Image (cartoon, rainbow, N blue to C red):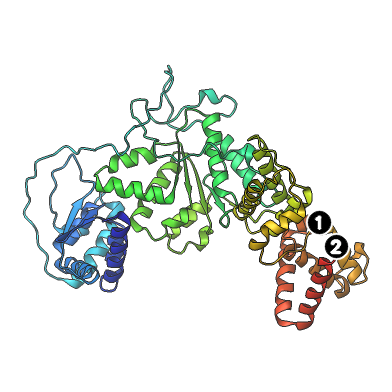
């Protein structure tokens, strides 16, 4: 059975069990149990905390509620086999008396005392009978770990005379002296790192919509573990978050060759964790992810519904931050909107720096297209596209960079088949892309032309349109102009704000106000339609 299938079945089992188990017990079980395998006779479940295994085995009612949930979901009476994933090597495993374990308040169990007392209290309400299993002698067996990866990567380091300090060192002035906390005799397997060398800062096109995230990313690459830690890059799909994250990793590898960089996706992280559990390689997994210097994870929002993986990620996250190791995360969901993540994790995401990316403005899209043309010509292709054609493509495809690049690839692909790469003009571009353009946008219009047109349309001076006067005869046309700059040519809020000498929050307010006016006021709606029609005729 595939790992994804097992996890889906287990999630359904937990949801059924949640209806009957006391909340405190369910909370402890859902974060401590990992499904390992299912066959026709049994379901094998890994337990991350030994005392949870004792609770299930000693409390018959808890065990029965779990097995009932398993039967309800799978339709079979399966034996529930519990495996202690992280047994203590120095102690002989025993089955402790649950009541004694959960009521003692010693120095050793201070960290789990609250949970343990809660579990016992709820368990006693279910079943008053408790048993004290006899202590069994179990021979000690050395745990054996089979390497996950075929070819481990051993990091070679220069011999140094002085001891490596307990704190990470990231000196910018002398990068050749950078050391890491990892001792030279412990190999770190980086073969699962997916760092793409093609994503770099020097081929990343910046504009007003992504200048701040780009600056934060460069700072991280120069000072890993510094002020921007963790760095959380937020933005809708297709805006270049992944490119920026990989650029950070590549720059760090070049600047600090001794630092160990792990770049992966949330899905890959989850699969590696599940695989380590199945093969009893938890120590190898922790060694890989907790002894690195830089952790880069793409699309972290996909871990929201993966309880066991979230727990492991939380522990890894804390371990790295406590040692001043750099963490970079990308997501299309803001931290405070990740409802399935615990507050303690969401707050840690926001504790560093959250960089927000917007859709690229017109100038940035034009720059991206010109960079793509240059890239094609570097492949010895004679590609010539008129500026009017480039501007047209940039204006029609403003959703995100991927859509823009897709339109570009269709244009040059068709031109190559028809042997037109040396003379791609506006007319040919419109014809080639007509089947993927649903509504043709106004072309060759910029902020200034909109300002000039609105001044004429409402018969006011341009200086009054751009000024600070709050009379309705000036404020209303001004808000319409701001709205059109966003709606018609999709300029970024910072760019519009600069053109009107306002704060970007003022532009947001104007856009929202006119949008609502269009919905509830037919007269305003007609004015906007009339203006758009006249703007179209200017081309």
Q: Residue at x 25, y 59 (%)?
A: 116
> Which of the two marks, 1 or 2, is nearer to us in this view?
2
Residue 451 circle label = 2
Residue at x 56%, y 49% (from the top left corner): 241
- Residue 45 place in picture, x, y as percent: 22, 56
Identify which residue, 260 or 103, lies in the foreground: 260
Count of picture labels: 2
Q: Where residue 96 sits: x, y (%)?
A: 14, 54
| Residue 289 placement (x, y as % from top left) | 38, 41
| Mark sitting earlier along the chain (1/2) | 2
**Residue ID for mark 1:** 499
SS at mark 2 in the image: helix
Q: Is residue 79 left or right of residue 267?
A: left
Q: Is residue 418 above or below residue 89?
A: below
Q: Is residue 337 visible?
A: yes
Mark 2 burial class by Cα count in 10 Å: few <14, some 14-19, many 20+: many
Disc 1 packing (10 Å; few <14; some 14–19; many ≥20): some
Q: Quadrant of residue 463?
A: bottom right
Q: Are marks 1 and 2 in contact (CB under 8 Å)?
A: yes
Q: In the rendered image of this protein, does residue 24 appear above or below residue 408?
A: below
Q: Would you identify the image quadrant in which residue 90 lies?
A: top left
Q: CA distance from mark 1 to mark 2?
A: 9 Å
Q: As displayed, is residue 327 above or below residue 166?
A: below
Left or right of residue 27: residue 143: left
The residue lying toward the viewer, choosing from 39 and 180, is 39
Does dot 1 land on a helix, a strand or a loop? helix
Q: Residue visible at 52% across and 29% down?
A: 256
């Amino acid at each position: 059975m595939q790992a994804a299938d097992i996890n889906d079945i287990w999630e359904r089992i937990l949801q059924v069990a949640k209806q009957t188990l006391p909340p405190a017990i369910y909370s402890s079980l859902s974060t401590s149990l990992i499904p390992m395998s299912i066959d026709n006779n049994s379901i094998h479940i890994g337990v991350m905390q030994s005392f949870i295994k004792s609770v299930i085995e000693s409390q018959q009612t808890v065990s029965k509620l779990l097995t009932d949930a398993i039967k309800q979901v799978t339709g079979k009476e399966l034996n529930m086999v519990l495996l202690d994933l992280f047994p203590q090597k120095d102690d002989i495993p025993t089955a402790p008396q649950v009541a004694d374990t959960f009521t003692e308040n010693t120095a050793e169990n201070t960290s789990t005392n609250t949970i343990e007392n809660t579990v016992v209290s709820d368990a006693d309400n279910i079943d008053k009978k408790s048993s004290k299993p006899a202590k069994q002698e179990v021979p000690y067996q050395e745990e054996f770990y089979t390497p996950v990866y075929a070819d481990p990567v051993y990091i070679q380091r220069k011999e140094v005379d002085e001891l490596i300090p307990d704190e990470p060192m990231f000196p910018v002035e002398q990068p050749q002296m950078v050391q890491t906390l990892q001792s030279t005799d412990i190999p770190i397997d980086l073969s699962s790192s997916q760092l793409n060398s093609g994503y770099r800062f020097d081929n990343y096109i910046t504009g007003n919509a992504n200048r701040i995230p780009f600056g934060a990313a460069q700072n991280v690459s120069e000072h890993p573990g510094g002020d921007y830690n963790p760095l959380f890059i937020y933005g809708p799909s297709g805006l270049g978050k992944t490119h920026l994250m990989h650029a950070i990793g590549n720059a760090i590898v070049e600047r600090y060759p001794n630092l160990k960089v792990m770049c992966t996706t949330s899905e890959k992280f989850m699969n590696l964790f599940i695989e380590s559990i199945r093969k009893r390689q938890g120590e190898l997994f922790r060694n890989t992810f907790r002894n690195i210097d830089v952790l880069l994870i793409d699309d972290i929002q996909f871990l929201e519904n993966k309880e066991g993986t979230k727990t492991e990620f939380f522990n890894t996250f804390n371990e790295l931050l406590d040692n001043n190791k750099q963490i970079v995360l990308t997501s299309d969901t803001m931290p405070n909107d990740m409802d399935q993540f615990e507050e303690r994790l969401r707050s840690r995401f926001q504790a560093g720096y959250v960089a927000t990316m917007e859709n690229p403005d017109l100038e940035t899209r034009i720059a991206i297209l010109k960079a793509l043309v240059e890239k094609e010509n570097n492949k010895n292709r004679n590609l010539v596209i008129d500026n009017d054609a480039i501007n047209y493509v940039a204006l029609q495809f403003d959703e995100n960079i991927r859509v823009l690049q897709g339109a570009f690839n269709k244009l040059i692909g068709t031109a190559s088949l028809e042997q037109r790469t040396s003379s791609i003009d506006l007319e040919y571009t419109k014809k080639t892309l007509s089947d993927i353009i649903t509504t043709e946008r106004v072309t060759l219009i910029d902020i200034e032309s909109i300002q000039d047109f609105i001044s004429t349309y409402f018969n006011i001076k341009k200086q009054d349109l751009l000024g600070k006067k709050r009379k309705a005869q000036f404020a209303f046309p001004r808000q319409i102009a701001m709205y059109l700059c966003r709606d018609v040519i999709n300029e970024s809020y910072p760019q519009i704000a600069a053109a009107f000498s306002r704060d970007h929050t003022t532009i947001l307010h104007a856009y929202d106000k006119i949008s609502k006016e269009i919905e509830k006021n037919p007269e305003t709606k007609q004015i906007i339609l009339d203006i758009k029609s006249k703007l179209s005729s200017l081309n």
